[in-house]
Image: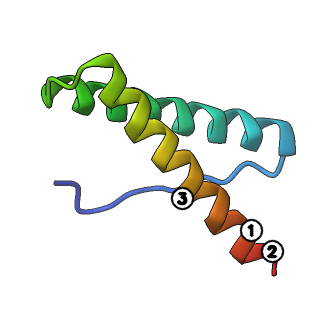
Amino acid sequence: MYKQAVIHYPSDERAMKQINKEIAALHCAAAVKYMDTLQLNCHQKVTVIDALLCDMQQGIQAANI
């Protein structure tokens, strides 16, 4: 494990958006890889993704209230 880290937050909004897109893509790839290890069939994967999307949508709506 690292003892020190340098965290850089670019002041350029465009660069920050690109970093956020890359992080989201990494999380999606990790989730898909994890689902593959569970050996789910296509229907089960769709069900899991739909449930996650509903949970995310509810979380966003709750945050906006």
Tag shown at residue 55? 3
The residue positioned 52% from the left and 56% from the top of the image is 7
Say whether marks 3 and 2 touch (CB < 8 Å). no
Q: Eyeballing the image, is 26 above or below 6?
A: above
Category of crowding for the residue at label 1, using alpha-carbon neighbours closer than 10 angstroms: few (below 14), some (14–19), many (at least 20): few
Q: Quadrant of the C terminus?
A: bottom right
The three-letter code of the residue at mark 1 reads: Gln
Say whether marks 3 and 1 touch (CB < 8 Å). no
The residue positioned 84% from the left and 36% from the top of the image is 14
Q: Earlier in the sequence, mark 3 or mark 1?
A: 3
Q: Eyeballing the image, is 29 above or below 27?
A: above
In the picture of the structure, the residue carrying the numbered disc 2 is 64
The alpha-carbon separation of the residues under discs 2 and 1 comes to: 5 Å
Q: Which of 34 and 5 lies nearest the eye of the viewer?
A: 34
The alpha-carbon separation of the residues under discs 3 and 2 comes to: 14 Å
The alpha-carbon separation of the residues under discs 3 and 1 comes to: 10 Å
Q: Is residue 38 left or right of residue 58?
A: left
The three-letter code of the residue at mark 3 reads: Asp
Q: Quadrant of the N terminus?
A: bottom left
Q: Position of residue 26 (x, y in %)?
A: 45, 32
Q: Is residue 2 left or right of residue 48?
A: left
**Secondary structure state at the residue bearing disc 2:** helix
The three-letter code of the residue at mark 2 reads: Asn
Could you say which quadrant of the image residue 27 lies in? top left
Say whether marks 2 and 1 touch (CB < 8 Å). yes
In the picture of the structure, the residue carrying the numbered disc 1 is 61
Q: Position of residue 3 (x, y in %)?
A: 23, 62
Total numbered labels placed on residues in the image: 3
The residue positioned 51% from the left and 40% from the top of the image is 50
